[in-house]
Image (cartoon, rainbow, N blue to C red):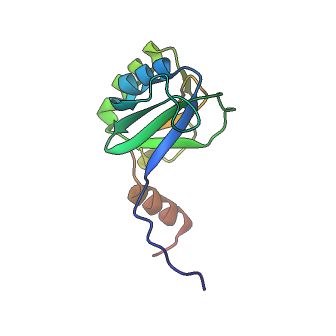
Amino acid sequence: MTQQTNIKGLSHITFMCKDLEKTSQFLKEIFSAEEIYSSGDSTFSISKEKFFRIAGLWDAIMEGESVDKSYNHIACQVNESDLSILEDRIKSLGLTILPGRKRNKSEGKSLYFYDYDNHLFEFHTGNLKTRLTIYNRDRNIVR
């Protein structure tokens, strides 16, 4: 049997990006990120970096190469009334918005978009509870 550990939660999320300043502006504009640290021209880790606070979570960006596009993504829960505002902000930065995937309408709405370095983000109006309720109902599973 595997010994239990005590995972306390997410520590931080780090994204590699080609342009720290451009990505900083993206984080501030789209996520209302608060910049809390910049290494400037110094390198304490593997490259120049900046730290942000987004919804109480420590997010880091480091100078480096972009990634290939994939469906791996970070999703943020938002109010449906904010989706059009967020979509306008995303478009104003010239970012790529993806068409939404087919889904049960009661799961909530989503807005998927890539940042400048091909990281995929989602703004989603649903939550885990509603998603599981729908999936279980559709499969006739009772929990």
Residue occupying image coordinates x 37% and y 22%: 29
Q: Nearer the viewer, residue 136 or 3?
A: 3
Residue occupying image coordinates x 53% and y 19%: 95
Measured from the top left, where is residue 124 in percent x and y?
42, 41
Measured from the top left, where is residue 102 in percent x and y?
57, 41
Visible in this render: residue 109?
no
Can you say whether 103 is above or below 3 in the image?
above
Can you say whether 96 is above or below 58 in the image?
above
Q: Nearer the viewer, residue 33 or 19?
A: 19
Look at the image and tell me in which quarter the N terminus lies: bottom right
Look at the image and tell me in which quarter the C terminus lies: bottom left
Tally the numbered discs. Answer: 0
Visible in this render: residue 108?
yes
Residue occupying image coordinates x 34% and y 38%: 53
The quarter of the displayed image where residue 129 is located: bottom left
Measured from the top left, where is residue 36 in percent x and y?
33, 33
